[in-house]
Amino acid sequence: MRFLKVLFWLLLGGLVAGFVIYNGDERVNVHLWSGLIADFSLPLLLILVFLAGLLPVLLAYHALRWRMRQRITGLERALNDLRAINAMPEPAAMPVPAPAATPPQTALPLGDVQ
């Protein structure tokens, strides 16, 4: 699985490098407020916009993951507490006296059953 992850990142890096090499000399004018114009290279602008869109989602993902880890830790702690309570030995019970011996009953022959 690690091999596939490394392969994916290498392919993605190759695509980005190819895009930068192919479009490196392209310039884009971004019109800002009050007549200001910013001149960016196209690959730099696209990478910045991609990272600006990825950052909030990445932060939300890590916050969700942290919250779930905290929740699982609390549930495991509660489960261990319940196991510790159930594992305690019960107090020794009073011995119950054995019933008095009764005389053996005689069995009737099968033919005499009414």
Image (spheres, rainbow, N blue to C red):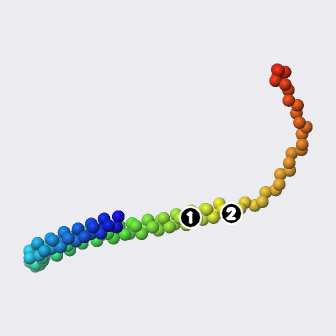
> Which amino acid type corresponds to the residue marked 1 in the rendered image?
Ala
Mark 1 or mark 2, earlier in chain: 1
Residue 8 location, quadrant: bottom left
Q: Dot 1 lies on which element?
A: helix
The answer to whether 89 is drawn above or below residue 20 in the figure is: above
Expressed as whole percent of the image width and height from the top left, the position of residue 3 reads 32, 67
Question: Which of the two marks, 1 or 2, is nearer to us in this view?
Answer: 2
The residue at which mark 1 appears reads as 78
The answer to whether 111 appears left or right of 80 in the picture is right
Expressed as whole percent of the image width and height from the top left, the position of residue 34 reads 11, 78
The answer to whether 62 appears left or right of 91 in the picture is left
Please give the name of the residue rendered at 71% of the width and 62% of the height, measured from the top-left corner: 89
The answer to whether 69 appears left or right of 33 in the picture is right
Badge 1 density bin: few <14, some 14–19, many ≥20, Cα 10 Å: few
Q: In the displayed image of the protein, which residue is found farthest to the front? A: 3
Quarter of the rendering occupied by the C terminus: top right
**Is the Cβ of the residue at disc 1 closer than 8 Å to that at disc 2?**
no
Front position in the image: 103 or 59: 103
> Which amino acid type corresponds to the residue marked 2 in the rendered image?
Met
The residue at which mark 2 appears reads as 88
The answer to whether 34 is drawn above or below residue 102 in the figure is: below
Front position in the image: 67 or 1: 1
Front position in the image: 23 or 63: 23
The answer to whether 106 is drawn above or below residue 65 in the figure is: above
Please give the name of the residue rendered at 85% of the width and 26% of the height, measured from the top-left corner: 108
Is residue 101 visible in the rendered image? The answer is: yes
Is residue 52 visible in the rendered image? The answer is: no
Please give the name of the residue rendered at 27% of the width and 67% of the height, measured from the top-left corner: 7
Expressed as whole percent of the image width and height from the top left, the position of residue 1 reads 35, 64
